[in-house]
Amino acid sequence: MVTANPILIPELKLMFSEGDTAGLREVAEELHPATVAEFSEGLDDQEIWQLLHVAAIERQAEIFPYYSMTRQVELVKAADRVHLGSLLEWMAADNRDDLLRELDPELVDEILPLVAKAQRHDIRMLLSCPEDSAGALMTTEYASLPAEITAGEAVTRLRSQAPNSESIYYIYVLDSDRTLLGFVSLRDLIMARPTSLVSDLMQSDPISVRVEEPSEQVVQKLARFDFIAIPVVDDHNRLVGIVTHDDVLDAVRQDATDDAQRIGAIAPLGESYLEAAIVSMTWKRGVWLMILFATAAVTAMVLARSPAAFQTHMWLVAFIPLIIASGGNSGNQSATLVITALSTGDCRLADWPRILKRECVLGLLLGTLLAVPGYCLALVYAPDPIAAIVIPLTIFGVVMLGTMVGSILPLLFRSVGLDPALMSNPFVSAIVDIVGIVLYMLVAILFLG
Amino acid sequence: MVTANPILIPELKLMFSEGDTAGLREVAEELHPATVAEFSEGLDDQEIWQLLHVAAIERQAEIFPYYSMTRQVELVKAADRVHLGSLLEWMAADNRDDLLRELDPELVDEILPLVAKAQRHDIRMLLSCPEDSAGALMTTEYASLPAEITAGEAVTRLRSQAPNSESIYYIYVLDSDRTLLGFVSLRDLIMARPTSLVSDLMQSDPISVRVEEPSEQVVQKLARFDFIAIPVVDDHNRLVGIVTHDDVLDAVRQDATDDAQRIGAIAPLGESYLEAAIVSMTWKRGVWLMILFATAAVTAMVLARSPAAFQTHMWLVAFIPLIIASGGNSGNQSATLVITALSTGDCRLADWPRILKRECVLGLLLGTLLAVPGYCLALVYAPDPIAAIVIPLTIFGVVMLGTMVGSILPLLFRSVGLDPALMSNPFVSAIVDIVGIVLYMLVAILFLG
């Protein structure tokens, strides 16, 4: 998907008004499909269809997926149904799948009969894969060959299969029931003597992913082995599709943005910041602010029951924000580290004892680090050096609390199958706030009576 | 880079003790290089070198870059200098560059004379590129052809150039002074009639990046156009290297982790969470906790000068954490959204008027949303409904403040050339805390005297 670039809009509008089909065709046919989408995104739906229509259907199918998803959905609604059927036939299977997942199921049922039977089967198969699985990321277009032919024959067959550019570089070697035997790169076919057998050239026991494997693992495998594509197999090791590097890159970028937004306490927008509707953004932020508000309200209610300590020792009030911030910040650090380590594959759920040990040590160190200046500051406002000890002791306690809660919570979310980034940071702050205030009051009562 | 997998360590140790060179060679030569690194990372430095030495030097150069960077540096220090020279000659230019950037400059000066002259030139060129630029990401290995030959000749020449697998798929068409004229994909060469001219097959005016362009823009271009590689040119449009999809994927994953860690107020670890030394982690977290502590100390000092309002209206104390949380949370949301939008390219610095307008509207909406339950809660603790108005008014104010500061700060950082993720979220919280408390006291004085 591309960001709209309005620079060509006046020229395009002029071409429409003058009926300059040759000019429009030059734009639609000669530029990179991504650039065509970028320059025309600013047109209205009918104008975009007019522009697309001057190009061949293959070309239309290349350009279409580069519009933003919201725009693609709008364009589908404004489109002629029969034309839509052939457009879908020509679209790459993975892009088509992404689009159909965004449409009303009723609309999909209406469009599908217009798509040729072969593609209809692929569509149903891809749509049945759970989101965020290898199956949802994959495309069903790939090049395949039997094992017992020569490199020369292989190149001739590839010419007739004419696979598209993203899937020709690895060719999968299958037996008669489509079991994945190995793969051979186009490079190796070209470099080999034309009489060599594919079975001798191929890399056997190829690294693959299962169709139901989470997309996170697909990303990790493809990144680890620097593949252009990774094969996707079913439970019987039969090839069902491939995931290509460009879709993995898109998935990584989207996941990174989603995770960062979750860490910042926002339900992922899933669309471009400037394009998101104000009302949906208000909802996606408001719901979290309300949840965090509710937990902060609990903190307020706890504080409102504050014992005599606060009334007779007003200087303690001044330290409330500092204590809350110390716990919250250290907790957020721990949560962020554990979330990023889990999502990059740097650590697994099974590493939990090591993680907790690390965070415990860090809590001790960081708690001590903050307790020292805390004590210095307390000496300024506290009536005597003994009373001032309340502050460093509480700070030490909330930092320990923060690192523990911050590391346990994402692990807990992961262990029950939730996304660790989902609610960890906000919940860590909330828990640490409430428990921190209670701890503060307990320490104050203990030392000041 | 891979995570260590200890499963084969006992077998490898047995092979060493039995001097089973054939077994070791099978491990080192037959598995994927990434898998060899994964299985052997748990050995000590000398054992790893022993394992590598049974394989051919090309193979060693393939395996080596898959060890973690800290490990690669250790291995280099333990290595025989002459062997190291030939290993560096065989390593892919981009991996070699990554490694050399991590070594002591003195050690590099010591090793370089042992590397063949041709590669030495490449190394100096790559090392001179600033980090996070296209030049630092690129490799100098690419396949190139003149424009006036036929597709058949082109394939023959490619066979003799024998480029490595990641750089054979796009072939760059250059004129005699290496100016980039276009590119042709290996697919198009294979699919074309052998007598067609490369100049007719090639895509002219190819999308490229300049050697000094920031890596963020390289990522955006490669992702937008779904390329396997993107050419890097100098100021005179001469080809100097290419950036391949796998290096972009690694860069995106690393940047995403770094950004998330910065948003969580940690200096990016730059290494695996479980492998990072406790002392370096304490430092990378401690320095931020201390900075945030200093700003929280300012809040405490402001509160300590609290006017009579707090002493006579103890119920106001209970709302301090709630007010701070409301401002901080909404500010963090805005900062996170602007940071992610800037880093994905969804918006640019020039969009600042639109961004501020959006955040202003959202501040109004979200402020109102939180003010309502705030007033309800205040009614419980305030002496009368007029006094209770202090709370919703302050909440509305701090939410507005949060969205404004949260959106302006990352834009400000970007405009002076800093990373917007660098310090935005922590600073937003800090500013909103201090100003929020002042605002609270002002509103309280206004309404309660």
Image (spheres, coloured by chain):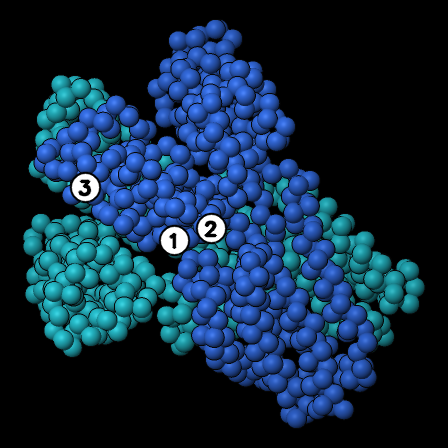
Chain colours: A cyan, B blue
Outermost residue to the front = B176
Q: Please name the residue that numbered disc 3 is placed on.
A: B199
Above or below residue B13? Residue A365 is: below
Query: From the image, which quarter does the C terminus of chain B lie in?
Result: bottom right
Q: Residues within 10 Å of mark 3 (few under 14, many from 20)?
A: some
- How far from the left and from the top, in percent, is residue B118? 44, 25
Q: Please name the residue that numbered disc 2 is placed on.
A: B214
A152 or A80, nearer to the observer? A152
- How far from the left and from the top, in percent, is residue B324? 65, 72
- How far from the left and from the top, in percent, is residue A371? 78, 54
- In front of the other: label 2 or label 3? 3
- In front of the other: label 1 or label 2? 2
Q: Chain of mark 1?
A: B
Query: Which numbered disc covers residue B220?
Result: 1
Which residue: 15% across, 65% down?
A23
N-terminal-most mark, 1 or 3: 3
N-terminal-most mark, 2 or 3: 3
